Image (cartoon, rainbow, N blue to C red):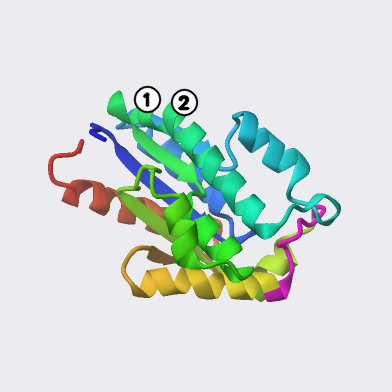
Amino acid sequence: MGKKGIFIVIEGLDGSGKTTQAKLLARKLEKTHKVLLTAEPSCGKIGAFIREDCLYEEKRLPIEAEALLFAADRIEHMYTEVKLALDEGKLVICDRYIYSSLAYQGSAGLSLEWIKTINARALQPDFSIFIDVPPERVIERLQRKKSIMENFETQQKVREVYLKYVDKGELVRINGDKPKDVVAEELYSKVLALIKSAKGLVS
């Protein structure tokens, strides 16, 4: 799948500040690049169903069905938004992507290889960054109605999966347990370096 833009994914635990950091990054990059900021679950039909009907205990589906829904949303998102923006030469910043499925559904007991298989047709990011915050810190931050995955034990397991991919070199780790502005500057500097190192892509 040819593309002219750059696809950047921001990952992290619930309450890690990744959504805030994705927004701050987009604002900084918009000064010099065309940028699309997006997120998963997406704003499409499947994404809306996931947000409204699948993330709370009383509505939870079997974990296999949950993983398939996220994968289906990812494909719809890719064709209706991400790929179009990349073909226009934009920097696409996505708040959550494939590694969220691996971390969350994987920590719930599904095979990581099976999750990769059902996501095999999804576009691969150019860069994936993990905003790392200790589980005890994110639980302190979570004050809204908690989803089924927003508890210490789950977040600890999720972080362990993320860190496996950091160790493999697939995710770039940034310490998110710092003041917001410090994290934002580190993230921006890291992304600029990654963009400059990407041969044949926009600078």
The residue that appears at 37% across and 25% down in the rendered structure is 84
Amino acid under disc 1: Leu
Residue 31: image x %, image y %?
35, 32
Q: Quadrant of the C terminus?
A: top left
Q: Secondary structure at mark 1?
A: helix
Question: Is 78 in the magenta?
Answer: no
The residue that appears at 54% across and 56% down in the rendered structure is 101
Q: What's drawn in magenta, residue-wise? A: 144-153
Numbered circle sitting on residue 107 = none
- Where is residue 152, by image quadrant? bottom right
Placement of 93 over or under 113, stated as above or below: above
Placement of 7 over or under 141, stated as above or below: above
Question: Is 151 in the magenta?
Answer: yes
User: Crowdedness of circle 2 by 10 Å Cα count: few (<14), some, many (20+)?
Assistant: few
Q: Which residue is mark 2?
A: 80
Tell me if I can see residue 183 in this picture. no
Q: CA distance from mark 2 to mark 1?
A: 7 Å
Do the CB atoms of the residues marked 2 and 1 lie less than 8 Å apart? yes
